[in-house]
Image: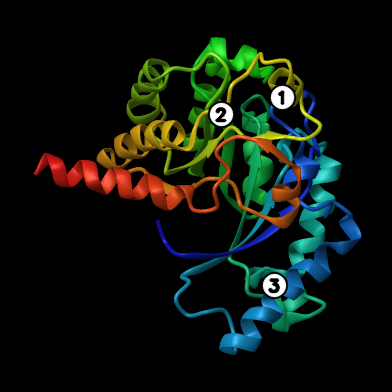
Amino acid sequence: MMKRFVIPLFIPHKGCRFNCIFCNQFSIASDSDNIDQVPETVKSYIDTQFEKFGGINPKYEETQISFYGGSFTCLSNEEMSSYFLLISDFLKSNADNSKFPQYCVTDSLRLSTRPDCITEEIAVFLKKNHVKTVEIGAQTLDDNLLKILNRGHTVKHITEACEILKSFDFEIGIQLMVGIPGETILSVENSLKLLTDVIKPNFIRIYPLIVVKGTVIEKMYNKGEYVPLTVDEAVERAAIIANACINKHIDIARIGLQYTKLLSENIIAGPALPNIGELVRQKVESALKNKK
């Protein structure tokens, strides 16, 4: 996967109709969903690059603006359009009509969403608005675990959404979680064949389930109904997924949550080490060496 400079815009819980047991987006990302702040946020990221490199760092092959944190395509077309309009001044393709053409450095857009909010009509709409990359918040490919998480969708929704996105030539990412209540190593391994042989995403993200304040899982934890994974257990399960994806040439975009001050202040329990991604990579590399 090409190296990209990604400008993240967080729209916490926007579009979400369900309250997943692990979720408190306002504890994970700053409350940056004020739509009026979007242009200044984007300009700030670009200014930082210009100050350091006189432009976007030449190591990046592409620049994307990304809508994270909510379920973007669950918004109405009017709401999505309002965001697309705000970032249009930063698109390279819009340089001639931009209010500030010096900031027109963006090649394409990316977003994260729920699988049950992808239709052919939405795919057409996204294509028209320069979206190239769509990340699906799957969390797991096990219907029983999806019910436990209160996701409100099934594995079939995930596979169908990916089929639609592939038919329109989108780049697809799948977000997966380890440490779900009721999950076992066997359930993780059983999901992998569907991931690597059927869905075949371009890339994945792997997150350990972290208990944060203000969530259903926090109540379960306090009652003794949920025991988080240890760091070693989380590393082992994430490494199983990572190794399977490496073998199938599926890129790994990230392992672990973005460790912010806000997140650290809201963590109750769980394997929330900032360097957990590095620990997983070391385990995968060690396993590969042992095979040789």
Q: Residue at x 62, y 53 (%)?
A: 259
Alpha-carbon neighbours of circle 2 within 10 Å: few (<14), some, or many (≥20)?
many
In the displayed structure, 207 sits above or below 195; it is: below
SS at mark 3?
A: helix
Chain-order first, disc 3 or disc 1 = 1
Circle on res. 20? 1
Q: CA distance from mark 2 to mark 3?
A: 29 Å
Residue linked to disc 2: 139
Give the amino acid type for the residue marked by disc 3 in the picture.
Tyr
Chain-order first, disc 2 or disc 3 = 3
Q: Residue at x 42, y 36 (%)?
A: 232
Q: Tell me if I can see residue 253 in this picture.
A: no
Residue linked to disc 3: 45
SS at mark 2?
A: strand
Q: Residue at x 89, y 54 (%)?
A: 34
Give the amino acid type for the residue marked by disc 2 in the picture.
Gln
